[in-house]
Image: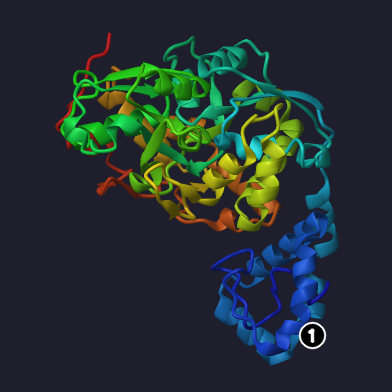
Amino acid sequence: MSDNNFFRPYSEHATLTGCACGKHESPEAHDRAAEQARLARSRDREMLSQDFVEAAAVRALFPNDVTRRRFLQAVGVGTAMAAISSVLPLTSLQAMADERGPLEKTNLKIGFIPINCATPLIMADPLGLYQEQGLSASLQKTAGWALVRDNMLNGELDASHMLAPMPLAISMGLGSNPQPMRVATIQNINGQAIVLALKHKENRDPKNWKGFKFAIPFEYSMHNFLLRYYLAEHGLDPDRDVQLRVTPPAEMIANLRAGNIDGFFGPEPFNQRAVYDQVGFIHVLSKDLWDGHPCCSFGVSEAFITENPNTFAALYRAILNAAAMAQDKAQLPTIAKAISTPNYLNQPETVILQALSGRYADGLGQVQNEPQRSGFDPMPWYSMATWMLTQMKRWGYVKTDVDYSALAEQVFLLTDARRQMAALGMAEAEAQLASGYKPFEVMGRPYDPTAPDDYLAGFDIPRMRTRP
């Protein structure tokens, strides 16, 4: 036991109930000398795991922070540590936490589409995060989303970067035979945009876009659902007033240059690449429609989880560690360099970094600074899933009644994500709401995840569409 513990369970100034990682503390000046040693422990994953167990145990003894602080003030830190160690088998608990079963499978095939959305999954390879977990990952670059789906269904891939709605669609048998798929984490939030051809610089009002042709990467994508939402909020029916064409992201630039499309709702780095190639401009960032929206996910089949629980846990840890690194703005230049190479994104490093960092040229002669343009919060909120289901129903992809919560809680592994984050000492493990049904707004319209059908009934275009 040591008062260097990263979570500071023996400090009367720390809080254990508000944030398990201690980020919401206000240490006094006398703590500063110990702070460097404490932070050094956080960079040692084994030590951090032990510290988390110790902090959790102390929190179990003192669920009320006021009581814990009074106890520490009354008896002193040294006496408190001795007393607690006499009643809690901390060494045994920490050893149990460190025990990990043997990996059922170490050689894995992991699919990805070469876009920024897959940053955590991709960067884990060149930066050695899979190897740290005892895994030998072979990343399989894939041309399009239909092929990702098919390769997951036939077992050619063990896991894959997927569009966040895809595991829901596959589990329901939409566009394929049904097979239980799971969202282990969200790969990225925000990070998409509507791009228009340069000829439309003076035609920014969507009400004037009747007859436009837009590319989207897949039907079961946030790009499709958010573009439809955006057009409908401006009075256009996306099935009747415009054309939506499913196009692989890598082909969007060529189609824009050739005049085959007027614009696209696409992933990075292709939005920024359109500016770089001087064929398009960024009309609106997806964060300005729904700040914090999910885009892609880390998907696995239920069968893989059942047959390889220890391997799945190791894979989980690698992806979560990568997501934590990707959320550190200081790491973005290193990450951009690592994923820009031909075997991964095969794009100019500067294009990737502009999209990741949020400091970018917009194609309209301005340099913008939007730090939240892209993010990598991995939490798979149930309410994200239920919103996607409302849009599938709204546009006729789902033709029957939906048990929104049951399907969301089956496919989105929120509880598993929290458990794995906690084991890694990540603050996100304590993210609220505990229920997993986090409310949000899309284009100013509040989404109440407890009443998805009421939300769906509130749209004028359309009430519910029948799709062939």
Based on the displayed image, in which of its 4 quarters is residue 115 positioned? top right
Closer to us: 237 or 67: 237
Q: Quadrant of the C terminus?
A: top left
Where does the image place residue 89, in percent across and percent down from the top left?
81, 64
Q: How is the image coloured?
A: rainbow
Where does the image place residue 133, in percent across and percent down from the top left?
80, 40
Visible in this render: residue 459?
Answer: no
Vertical relation: 327 (above or below) 106: below
Q: Which residue is mark 1?
A: 79
Residue at the location (46% across, 47% down)?
361
Closer to us: 308 or 444: 444
Visible in this render: residue 228?
Answer: yes
The amino acid type found where label 1 is placed reads Thr
Count of number-bearing discs: 1
Residue at the location (79% across, 55% down)?
45
Based on the displayed image, in which of its 4 quarters is residue 289 positioned? top left
Where does the image place residue 78, in percent across and percent down from the top left?
80, 84
Q: Secondary structure at mark 1?
A: helix
Q: Is residue 7 shown left or right of residue 206?
A: right
